[in-house]
Amino acid sequence: MAVAFHLLAHRNPAQAARLLKAIWHPDNTYVVHYDKRRPAEEHRAIHALAEGKPNILIQKPRAVLWGRFSLYRAQHEGLRLAIDSGRSWSHWINLSGQCYPLVPIEGIQQACSEAGEHSFVRHFEPLVNGDWPHPQERLTGYVLDSVCLEWWLRLPGIGRRLRRIFGGESSLPRLPGIRRALPKTFTWFGGDNWVVLSRAAAEHLVLAAKAATIIAALRHSAIPEESVFQTVLMNSPFSAQVINQHRRLINWRHGMASPTVFTTADWPALMQGATDGNWFARKFEAASPILDMIDAHLLHRTKP
């Protein structure tokens, strides 16, 4: 059973290449997005990955800002590219450049075949439960997604003064004085950016009019990539086919805003994660010895 992958990377083409090799299968479809702001030589290295491989599609690059709609948009466009490719696949899986499989690709393909029409999307209702502090603030502000503004905000001196105007040092930039109403036409869901979507669910996300309405409503929310997938699918006919997990082992540490990088000290946890049914783990650094251990003992690969 063929699978479609979307790889969203923003640095280190060699690490992206290693990930592609680890999940390679000629029947699968691979869409690769590499951040527009990176140097030309890195983009040439990314394009080289597709040479002689018609099932690797290099996506038109965009500048991607964490926590802004541009991150979700890059994935949405990559999903549409996989659908429009005309290639056959049963499920769509999104990955970052710092993900790595814990299961051989044949095992992932088999698991997707067994999943049938089910999708794997961790979800909760943030205004009712879940693990987000102050969730309402994600919806009521008007977050600005501008590379130009981001450049100004990073300038010494003036950037700090601008940040005070647009929401403060530690928050995403917001239009001052704007408070948006909570949605009334759909239930807001949240979770993680990392999903496994059935083909039918993926097509609904890209093609359905109601999906487009929800995506537009969440466009200026904070960190929309952690709620668009969930909100669209849980307000759709596919909600009963969504399994509340994402098949990833993520290295969260208490009090950390982003995952910690796995090291060799985490080997027991990674082995247990694979046993527990996780297909991927994140995050990893390039050329880390832990990747060699995964290759040898979990993926049974002799060459990275």
Image (cartoon, grey):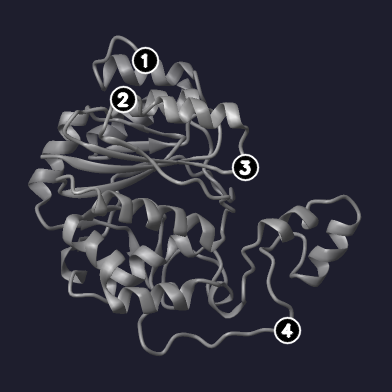
Q: CA distance from mark 1 to mark 2?
A: 8 Å
Q: Residue furthest right?
A: 157
Q: Amino acid at mark 3?
A: Arg
Residue 248 percent across, percent down from the top left: 33, 43
Q: CA distance from mark 4 to mark 2?
A: 48 Å
Q: Earlier in the sequence, mark 4 or mark 1?
A: 4
Residue 251 percent across, percent down from the top left: 46, 40
The residue beneath circle 3 is 37
Judged from the image, the secondary structure of the residue bearing numbered disc 1 is: loop
Q: Name the residue located 38 percent from the left edge and 58 percent from the top edge.
A: 76
Q: Name the residue located 22 percent from the left edge and 27 percent from the top edge.
A: 104
Q: Earlier in the sequence, mark 1 or mark 2?
A: 2
Q: Quadrant of the N terminus?
A: top left
Q: Amino acid at mark 4?
A: Gly
Q: Amino acid at mark 2?
A: Ala
Q: Earlier in the sequence, mark 4 or mark 2?
A: 2
* 22 relative position to 181: left or right: left
* 303 relative position to 167: left or right: left
The residue beneath circle 2 is 22
Q: Amino acid at mark 1?
A: Pro
The residue beneath circle 4 is 177
Q: Is residue 31 visible?
A: yes
Q: Earlier in the sequence, mark 3 or mark 1?
A: 3
Q: CA distance from mark 2 to mark 3?
A: 26 Å
The residue beneath circle 1 is 304
